[in-house]
Image: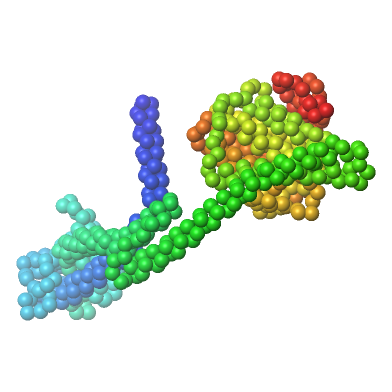
Amino acid sequence: MRRYLRAVARYGARAVAFGQQRAVQFGELWRRSLQVRVVVSTLALSSAVVFVLGMVLQNQITDRLLETKEEAAIAATRDSVAVAQRQLQGVNLAADAVRPRLQQAWNKLSSSTPNTDTVSSSAGTFEPVLASPSQSLSADGEVVSAGPYDDVPESLRHFVENNQLAVQIHTVDRPSGRTTFLIVGTPFGSTQQRMQLYMLYPLTAEQSTIAVVQSTLLVGGLVLLLLLAGIANLVTRQVVRPVRSAAQAAERFAGGELDERMVVVGEDDVARLAQSYNKMAESIERQIRQLEEFGGLQRRFTSDVSHELRTPLTTVRMAADVLHASREQFPPGLARSTELLVDELDRFESLLGDLLEISRLDAGVEELSAEYADVRPIAVRAAQAVAAIARNAGTEIILDLPDEETPAEVDSRRIERILRNLLANAVDHGDGHPVRLRMAADDDVLAVTVRDYGVGLRTGEADLVFNRFWRADPSRNRHTGGTGLGLAISLEDARLHGGDLDAWGEPGKGACFRLTLPRQHGVTIKSNPLPLPPPDAKVPTGMAADVQPLTDDAMRVTVAGNDEAKPELEPPTPVWEEAR
């Protein structure tokens, strides 16, 4: 028994899983196919209409058959009343005298046929029942009758006893089976000799007719639904096919096949749609060509100008270095001007380098020199590169790195540049609060977040920070003297690795930038080991910035009062010490 129950449960689970799978597949087909939706909707609405019409027709036919049967049965009953009156004329109401006369009249009615000259001929066969009045009872107290008096329902007897002609449909259980009769009951005779006549007309023929009508309506409805479904499918295909053709042409056009056009057939609405699409495609192609030419000119101009500026910049740099080396011999004002000149030349060289890098990225000539390397030392080098800037800004850099090696197929130079730009940006906008770099990895993906607790980002600015030369607040003082291209270059470097760089921020809660990279080139990123927004995004302002400084033996970070110690990373030189 248990084995049987387990088998039933197993097959039941399979059936449920199969049904769920088919439901999901149908749901996807329903969402993606206009043709399926139109055909199914047409079929559903047509089914409702056919069902309603079938019910109405069936009720009309049934009512008409019963009305005809009832009229014929009443007419035949009246003819039978005349025959019974002749047979029972002058009968004595005593029980012993009534019984043989009732039986004789019953035999006469059973052997007689309806009058062919009247509507009673359509009543069909019948079973007569004759009964004496209630005062003429047999010795055992039963009503004296001839025929199947027990098949007559009590409700019909009550009407006839009150001298009313009554009709009722009643189902009788007999040894041969259940039979439905149309029973007509009527009193007859004189006031002193009241008798009762019940005529039982089988409805077998009418039931057969109704069954044939029901099967005909059912088959006809199914055929009609199939025809409607086929017609709807054909009509929908005529409309959907051009739409699908337009969608395929648009997909190929979006994929770069700018010469893709739709075929114009006829002069109907679909043809006008194709003509409009072709005109739109030609206009877009022309504008794209113009933009490509303009972009090429712009990139070539940027590259040429950057290269041409190299020679005069080198000359100016040499002269500035000579002046800077002799600044102690100048008056204080002139010496200060020399220092400012050198600082601005440094920034100009950085801007020129970024412009050359952007031009190479735009031209698509940059190559990725990727090799497997531990990413943790790269993060340490990036933090050491901005340590002096952080010390001047009063900002502490906290490294939260994995205990074990974290190898990935990366271009170390580019990754270090990304992390250096992110750290410098965090220091610049951190308002003196600590900056935390956190690294985590799983089997396929490596993620690094740089978190600051400064002014943060307003709504919509997270998508703008990677635009070239964009600044959230142009009036804000910068500690790093950036060129405005660092984050744009970082985003391109991340995409060159097959990864991504995204940002989060809220006013007063700081900002967080997340770098996501595949650990092996060509792997698709499906998950991320570090969430964005960061876990401390809901911590009240000031609580998340409770960080302890780095020590010589370990890197420790305290977030909202919880201490988490990290082991030493070789070499164990903290960022502050290297900066000194």
Q: Nearer the viewer, residue 221 or 109?
A: 221
Q: Nearer the viewer, residue 135 or 275?
A: 275
| Quadrant position of the N terminus in the picture | top left
Q: Give the answer, above or below, for where 339 lies relative to 227.
A: above
Q: Quadrant of residue 259?
A: bottom left
Please provide percent x and percent y for residue 88.
12, 73
Please provide percent x and percent y for residue 482.
73, 44
Q: Give the answer, above or below, for where 406 lies relative to 80.
A: above
Q: Quadrant of residue 194?
A: bottom left
Q: Residue at x 75, y 53 (%)?
A: 473
- Compared across the picture, whether 103 is left or right of 312 comes to left
Please provide percent x and percent y for residue 408.
57, 28
Please provide percent x and percent y for residue 120.
12, 75
Q: Nearer the viewer, residue 50 or 8?
A: 50
- Compared across the picture, whether 563 is left or right of 439 comes to right
- Compared across the picture, whether 83 is left or right of 16 comes to left
Q: Give the answer, above or below, for where 266 lies relative to 242.
A: below
In the orientation shown, which residue stands out farthest toward the right? Answer: 331
| Quadrant position of the C terminus in the picture | top right
- Is residue 59 visible in the rendered image? The answer is no
Q: Quadrant of residue 475?
A: bottom right
Q: Residue at x 86, y 46 (%)?
A: 337
